[in-house]
Amino acid sequence: MPRILILHATLGTGHLSAARALGEAFARYPDVDCRIEDILDHVGPVLRPAMKLWYEGLSEKAPPLYRFIYESSNTGDVEDPGSGSKLLGLMERSLMTDLEEMIVEAAPDVVISVHPISIQLLRYLKTSGQLTAQHYIVITDFMAHSTWLSDSVDGYFVPGEFTRYVLERRGVDPSLLHVTGIPINLEIAEPKAPLDMRQKHDLPTDRPLVSLFAGGIDAKRVRLMVERLLEGEQPTTLAVVAGRNEEVGEALADLTDGPQVQLRRLGRIDYVDDLVTASDLVISKAGGLIVSEVMARSIPMIIIDPLPGQEEWNADLVAGSIAGVQLRMPEMVPLAALYLLGQPEKLAAMREQARRLGRPRAAQDVAERVRAALGAPRPATVLETA
């Protein structure tokens, strides 16, 4: 039975979501032993808080500094990944001894990286002969930073044709590049009717639905957007998902329906895909996973407040493909949303572009390609249920 090790890192929620989606896809095959590990569970007491500080502290509290470091380290090609990757590799060898031991002891047949932290360590283990496993990289943003590059990888699974083009330009062998999309929840590959989803969650069926995923947005900016959206003159339902952000819930506590707009305040929900499917328009940040989930349902987006670096690049991809718009000023979000709701032909065109970007079967496609590389047969029943 082939042993597959999936490595992710709990820096944000996207990498974990991608790892879980892959785990669920492999679980559909009875002849595969799949194990998911958080890299940060196997690092020293210095590196874990340092990585948390780097991602959560700098990106949210000091965006200009984060952008400068992120973009200035994005240098080199596959033969010379650049100073950022080299530095990361040095840290990995000195601070990730527990991770190294876990990988070697696991003796996997395949290692799948859904975060770049461990890539240089895996390169060292392969080139030194300590690891014979195939190594695949699943890139979880639409633009690949140089830290994703390795000259000892067996394949890359990339979000789209643009990502493949960029990696080819950086010297990656085209035969190693497989366009699958970013692995997302398997249920998104299943058809759902928007009307059914509205009825299931008691949402009006006679008016457009705008869903604002506000968990990662400053509460004051959310309040500003919601107040203006409630002034809209077209009958609309506005669903605001606060998620774990208690400040958003508090900021909206005193708001009620507008003259034409019904407000639904939601906290943490376990039916994100249902809500996306039911929506005519989604307002959100630009994490690779949420963008992939929304595009897979062919829903237009308004992107607000993308974090420096990868989220800005994700937002550029959506806006450049005319599947959505990217806005920096929260004051502009209501104007854009109300305009689009009044222009159904524009929304329809954006929906079609989103459909072209969306890849709902990404996790299944990765699993099938990995199993094929191992020489395993593909049971017909798996495809039928997928």
Image (cartoon, helix red, strand yellow):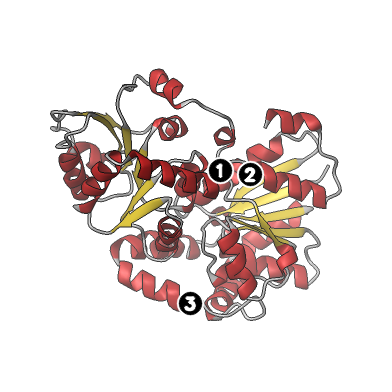
Viewport quadrant of the N terminus: top right
Task: Mark 3: give few (<14), some (14-19) or many (20+) Cα within 10 Å.
Answer: some
In front of the other: 290 or 179: 179
Say whether residue 153 is visible: no
Q: Position of residue 258 (x, y in %)?
A: 14, 30
Q: Are marks 2 and 3 in contact (CB under 8 Å)?
A: no
- Earlier-in-chain disc, 2 versus 1: 1
Marks 2 and 3, how far apart in space?
Answer: 29 Å
In percent of width and height, residue 42 lies at: 58, 56
Classify 10 Å Cα crowding around label 2: few (below 14), some (14-19), many (20 and above): many
| Image x and y of residue 66, in percent | 37, 70
User: Who's the residue at 29% across and 26% down the image?
Assistant: 207
- Kindly indicate the quadrant of the structure image that contains residue 144: bottom right
Q: Between 184 and 358, which is closer to the camera in this rendering?
A: 358
- Residue behind mark 3: 73
Give the amino acid at mark 1: Ile
What's the residue at 26%, 48% (across, down)? Answer: 336
Instruction: First in sequence, mark 2 or 3: give its number.
Output: 3
Q: Which mark is residue 363?
A: 2
Q: Secondary structure at mark 2?
A: helix
Quick one: label 1, few (<14), some, or many (20+) residues within 10 Å? many
Q: For the residue marked with disc 3, what is the amino acid?
A: Ser
Marks 3 and 1 sit apart, C-alpha to C-alpha, by: 28 Å
Compared across the picture, whether 37 is left or right of 13 comes to right
Are circles 2 and 1 on residues that touch, CB within 8 Å?
A: yes
Q: For residue 8, which numbered disc appears in the image?
A: none
Q: CA distance from mark 2 to mark 1?
A: 6 Å
Q: Secondary structure at mark 1?
A: loop
Q: Which of pointers 3 and 1 indicates the residue nearer the eye?
A: 1
Q: Which residue is mark 1?
A: 184
Q: Position of residue 282 (x, y in %)?
A: 36, 41
- Location of residue 156 with respect to 31 vertically, above or below: below
